[in-house]
Image: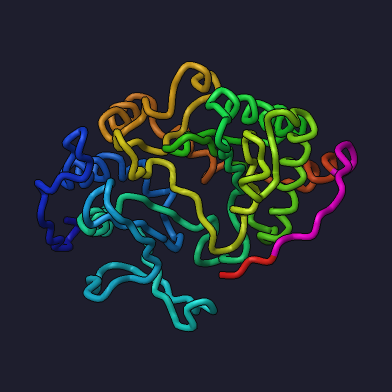
Amino acid sequence: MQGHEVSISNLDKVFWEEEGYTKANLINYYVQVFPYLAPHLSERPLVVTRYPSGAGGKGFYQKNAPEGTPDWVHTYPMYSSHSQRCLNFVICDNLATMVWLANQACIELHPWMSRIGSLDRPDFVVFDLDPSEGATYEDVCLVAEAIREVLNYLKLRFYLKTSGATGLHVYVPVINTHTYDELRDFVRRVAETVVSLIPEKATVIRKVKDRQGKVYVDYLQNIQGKTVCSPYSVRPRPGAPVSTPITWDELRKTQPGDFNIVTVPPRLKRIGDIFSGVINERQRIDEAYRLLNLNFPTRREPEPVSIE
């Protein structure tokens, strides 16, 4: 495969019990979608979640390339203050690496928001919409639409995808001249503006018990080293759902469960990667930030300390 030999095993192992989907189905899915997925992984340190016993079993995050990683798999070394050692992050830049990962039961893919040439400056920011207990998918849609209203006012381009679970992700591509701290402050201000527009539906309160059945607009994912699942990443949930880019017209006409390892490949062949703008259409946010500060004054809260 691309001049590399990839050993695969246990293809009949069932990864999704109810549906009967196997490891072979997972590998086949990633082979089919890789032409569309590859630009979203290129040059980005990758964190994966592995489920050796299948999606219903115990999983674990993997940042460091495991022992026995083939020589042809590209990695990028970074010192981890948390682990107090150097971690070699996998860079998934070819199909052989993707198949090698899927064979290890890597179901979820979590690339960094920044690339190895500019690790402290992300290429996009993310609004992660997470419904609290008692909130509905309808509520999530309402909050997403409020974000759309604010971003349209700020004259920014933005893109929508399902999380593959119960939430939604809104991405805003940016020219990577700003740090994570600067961009997180921007996302926080937009999030607080959304809360001011629909306080009965949205919240930025971190403590789960204090969210009162609202949709949490998580801006704290925009921290160096934190990740959200990639577009076209499979999720270890019933039905083998996929985090899938959708249009705003589709928001009210579909459910997250409509997109899975069976339905997404033909969808991509039909409509292509409607998320490509996140990679190809980067934009400055200076004027948007000015408008936001001028028209939506907010009380600045101290940023929480991130301990990695």
Say if residue 273 shows up in the picture.
Answer: yes
- Residue 299 within the segment the image draws in magenta: yes
Residue drawn at (51%, 55%), measured in percent from left and top?
227
Pick the residue in front: 47 or 199: 199
Location of residue 295 in the rendering, given as x and y in whole percent from the top left corner: 88, 36
| Quadrant holding the N terminus | bottom left
Q: Could you say where residue 308 lies in the image, as x and y percent from the top left?
A: 56, 70
Does 81 sit above or below residue 114? below
Measuring from the top left, give residue 9's x and y in whole percent. 10, 57
Check the image and report above or below for 230 versus 262.
Answer: below
Name of the residue lying farthest toward the bottom: 84
Point out the stretch of residues depicted in magenta.
293-304
Give the mark count.
Answer: 0
Answer with the quarter of the image where residue 197 lies: top right
Q: Quadrant of residue 37?
A: top left
Left or right of 16 in this view: 192: right
Query: Residue placed farthest to the top in the image?
Result: 253
Towards the viewer: 283 or 11: 11
Q: Is residue 241 magenta?
A: no
Residue name at image x 45 percent, y 83 percent: 85
| Residue that extends furthest to the front in the rendered view of this protein | 209
The residue under the point 50% across, 66% down is 116
Q: Quadrant of residue 33?
A: top left
Magenta span main SS: loop
Name the one closer to the observer, 178 or 106. Answer: 106
**Of 4 and 128, the residue lying toward us:** 128
Residue 94, can we see it?
no
Residue 287 % position (x, y): 80, 43
Above or below: residue 189 compared with residue 196: below
